[in-house]
Image (tube, rainbow, N blue to C red):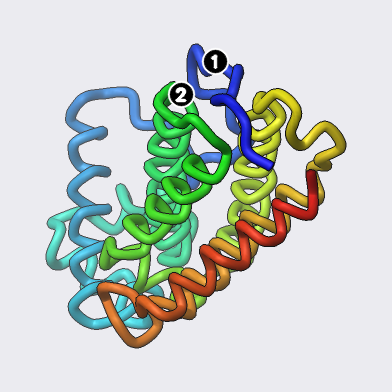
Amino acid sequence: MTDAGSGRVWGTIPPTRLPGGLRKKPLQERSKAAIRNVLDVAAQIVLEQGVDALVGSPTLLLERSGFSKGSFYAFFETPDSVLDELALQCMLDSREEQAKLFSDPGFGTWTEFVDALVDQYCDWFRIPLVRAIWVGQRFTANTRLRDRIWIEEMAVMLHAELSGYEGCFENLTLTQCEVVVEVLERLGQVAFRDDPDGSESVIDEMRTLVHGYLAVCQ
């Protein structure tokens, strides 16, 4: 069953529980710029040489960023922490885009919204850094925890959105929404494992699976 658009109105992005990845927050503009540069260089290293080149030692990162060893350890506990921060920024960027999608009043039916949600996840996986971290599952323990929190928060937003379609999803649970988000993330990894543009056949199956699952959740 499909019905009129969601009655849910997102005023602002709901607050996140995602923890920051830095030892301390840079306060001065110079420090903020230095951290941004370190993260930009770190992303380049991951894309050019892989995650191991970043987390194995900070030497390459320090050489290319011009960041001193003392300053590095003032903000990052280990090289893994740099990867944590890169992954966190990917999650926060995605979360912001999801909130924009959820605030779009242009969907007449929940199926239209779900199609747009699948498309947005695919766009996220087309980002090279996202593929390098998520498709390869190069998670530290901290990033795995953050990914779990991120999925839970996406599920809350999805539940609020779908529950707004009058006459639909009156008994929808958060667990069911978590399943949907897990499907989008895990099958997204499969779809983009060998193809940076995504396997159309896997994406089609992902779309069919999410539609079918939510249809029986009404």
Q: Residue at x 45, y 38 (%)?
A: 98
In this view, the residue in front, 150 or 57, is 150
Q: Amino acid at mark 2?
A: Ser
Q: Residue furthest right?
A: 171
The vertical placement of 84 against 218, above or below, is below
Q: How many marks?
A: 2
Residue 2 in percent (x, y) is at 63, 38
26 vs 213, left or right, is left
Residues under numbered marks 1 and 2 in contact, where contact means CB atoms less than 8 Å apart: yes
- How many C-alpha atoms fall within 10 Å of the one at disc 1: few (<14), some, or many (≥20)? few
Q: Residue at x 18, y 48 (%)?
A: 37
Q: Amino acid at mark 1?
A: Val
In this view, the residue in front, 1 or 77, is 1
- Identify the residue under disc 2: 103
Q: What kind of element bears circle 2?
A: loop
Residue 135 in percent (x, y) is at 44, 76
